[in-house]
Image (cartoon, rainbow, N blue to C red):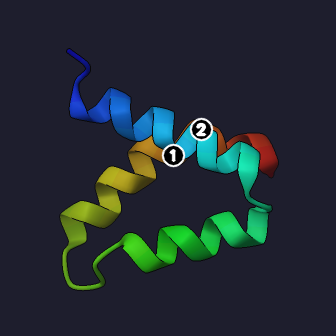
């Protein structure tokens, strides 16, 4: 069984391939709760490699 982190990484990888950079960032903004710092931190860690490849 896949861990939650692996599933999230896989989903972000698929989305990154299918969406433009602008669409991908807009998606990230839409799903991250603005009031929970931990969620933002988790997404930053999980997507670090994906985002650094586009910059």
User: In the image, what residue occupies the spot 21% across and 84% down?
Assistant: 35
In what element is the residue under mark 1?
helix
Left or right, 50 with reference to 10: right
- Could you say where residue 22 lies in the image, as x and y percent from the top left? 75, 72
The circle drawn on residue 12 is none
Q: Label 1, on which residue?
A: 47
- When asked about the image quadrant of residue 26, the answer is bottom right
- Could you say where residue 11 lies in the image, as x and y percent from the top left? 48, 41
Q: Depth check: give the residue in front, 54 or 8.
A: 8
User: In the image, what residue occupies the spot 22% across and 25% down?
Assistant: 3
Left or right, 44 with reference to 35: right
- Could you say where residue 33 lies in the image, as x and y percent from the top left? 28, 78
User: In the image, what residue occupies the spot 50% across and 67% down?
Assistant: 28
Question: Which of the two marks, 2 or 1, is nearer to us in this view?
Answer: 2
- When asked about the image quadrant of residue 37, the answer is bottom left
- Mark 2–mark 1 Cα distance, whole angstroms, equals 9 Å
The circle drawn on residue 13 is 2
The first of marks 2 and 1 along the sequence is 2
- Could you say where residue 6 lies in the image, as x and y percent from the top left? 35, 27
């Amino acid at each position: 069984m896949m861990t939650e982190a692996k599933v999230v990484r896989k989903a972000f990888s698929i989305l990154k391939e299918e969406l433009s950079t602008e669409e991908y960032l807009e998606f990230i903004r839409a799903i991250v709760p603005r009031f929970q710092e931990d969620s933002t931190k988790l997404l930053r860690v999980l997507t670090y490699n994906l985002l650094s490849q586009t910059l």
